[in-house]
Amino acid sequence: MTEVACDIYQAVFTVDENVRFLNAIRGIADACGTHIILFDADRLAGRTHVEAALRHARRSWAGGEAIANSIEMEALLYAAGTRQCQVAASFGIHPGENRSYIAVCPPAPGVRDRLAGLVTFVDGDWDGIDPAKRARLSDLFAITPEEVAVVGEARFRDLVLERVALLDVYR
């Protein structure tokens, strides 16, 4: 997967069983000749976080330096800022109600219509980081109050994106 564009959607859906749901997603991706990556919106610092994870994953994949054996898991590893697949998997789907960014790379005709059978697409601004989400992201990415004090509250998202980029350093 080289530098290709991705369509990124926001959706909500319920997962009864992860493997079954992911098999249905994989079936759609295979039928349409694309990759579909599901990111847990509640564990991400917005759309720019998704874009950064996709960009880094594409670069490592194209350069033959991928950690994972699929571009989907590679993108989740970058989203989580870790080399641990088990941790990265928690940045994908989970049983129960999900709020997800869905990346379709490359864009493919008919994918959105097929996905609509499994998910409900939603509009709205998911980029906000309220105090509860800030606390969750601070825990997930080991961001200290001292770091936030240095860069300022307004640049909190940049600290998360730095963790995504740092995965390249920890190879």
Image (tube, rainbow, N blue to C red):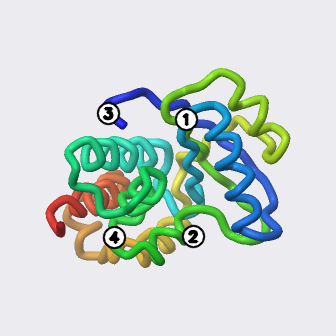
Q: Nearer the viewer, residue 15 or 132?
A: 15
Disc with the residue nearer the chain's start (3 vs 1): 3
Give the mark, 1 or 4, whose residue is nearer the N terminus: 1
Label 3 element class: loop
- Mark 3 nearby-residue class (10 Å; few <14, some 14–19, many ≥20): few
Give the position of the C terminus as an image quadrant: bottom left
Disc 1: which residue = 34
The residue under the point 24% across, 63% down is: 167
Badge 4 crowding class, 10 Å Cα cut-off, few under 14, some 14 to 19, many 20 or more, is many
Q: Which disc, if any, is residue 132?
A: 2
Q: Which residue is mark 4?
A: 82
The secondary element bearing badge 2 is classed as helix
Label 1: which secondary element = loop
Between circles 3 and 4, the one closer to the viewer is 3
Q: Nearer the viewer, mark 4 or mark 2?
A: 4
Please state which amino acid type lies under the numbered disc 2.
Ala
Image point (55%, 60%), residue name: 130
Q: Nearer the viewer, mark 1 or mark 4?
A: 1
User: Whole-Å distance between the Cαs marked 1 and 4?
Assistant: 25 Å
**Quarter of the figure with the N terminus:** top left
Q: Are marks 2 and 3 in contact (CB under 8 Å)?
A: no
In the rendered structure, are the residues bearing label 1 and label 4 in contact, judged by CB atoms less than 8 Å apart? no
Up-down relation of residue 105 to residue 153 (above or below):
above
Residue type indicated by callout 3: Thr
Q: Closer to us: mark 1 or mark 2?
A: 1
User: Mark 1 or mark 2: which comes first in sequence?
Assistant: 1
Label 3 and label 1: CA atoms lie apart by 13 Å
Mark 4 to mark 2: distance in Å? Answer: 22 Å
